[in-house]
Amino acid sequence: MERNVFRQPLQLHGARPLTGFMRTGYCEAPRSDFGNHSVAAVLTDEFLDYTASKGNDLRSAGLTSGCKWCLCASRWKEAFEARTSDTDAKVPRVYLRKTNERALESVKLEDLSKFAVDAEQNNGS
């Protein structure tokens, strides 16, 4: 069973469009997912511009600002490290209960929590 960053069952993230490495709507991150698509995020125009500038144009896949998408932990961390403030829209907001525990292989929970969606910040309860 896939678990979230709180070691609880992973919650569904997005079905329109169907997201996740396995395209199940969950941010499942099996070992075969070398990109570690584990961060349950809400895309912003600023992030879409940023990731396109790094060679990954998600808009070409039909994604737009507001889409829920399972991001590679390394790309989320890269945007986090490039931020100008803790309100920088370049860093997508995340749903912690929908973020796979594998994200913690690359990103600190403390960092994810800084960009957590309301009510997601206190241990998933």
Image (cartoon, grey):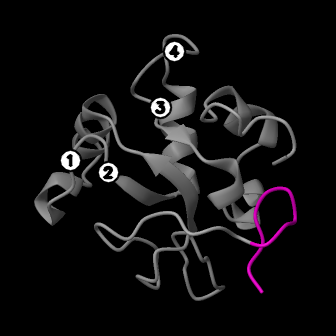
Q: CA distance from mark 3 to mark 1?
A: 15 Å
Against 1, residue 95 (above or below) is above
Q: Which residue is mark 3?
A: 91
Among the two numbered marks 4 and 1 on one chain, the one whose residue lies closer to the N terminus: 1
Residue 57 seen in the current view? no
Q: Which residue is mark 4?
A: 87
The magenta stretch is 1-9
Q: Is residue 111 magenta?
A: no
The amino acid type found where label 3 is placed reads Val
Q: CA distance from mark 3 to mark 2?
A: 14 Å
Against 60, residue 88 (above or below) is above
Q: Which mark is residue 64?
A: 1
Assign the magenta stretch its main secondary structure.
loop
Most foreground residue, 124 or 42: 124
Q: Residues within 10 Å of mark 1 (few under 14, many from 20)?
A: some
Q: CA distance from mark 4 to mark 3?
A: 8 Å
Q: Which residue is mark 2?
A: 67
SS at circle 2: loop
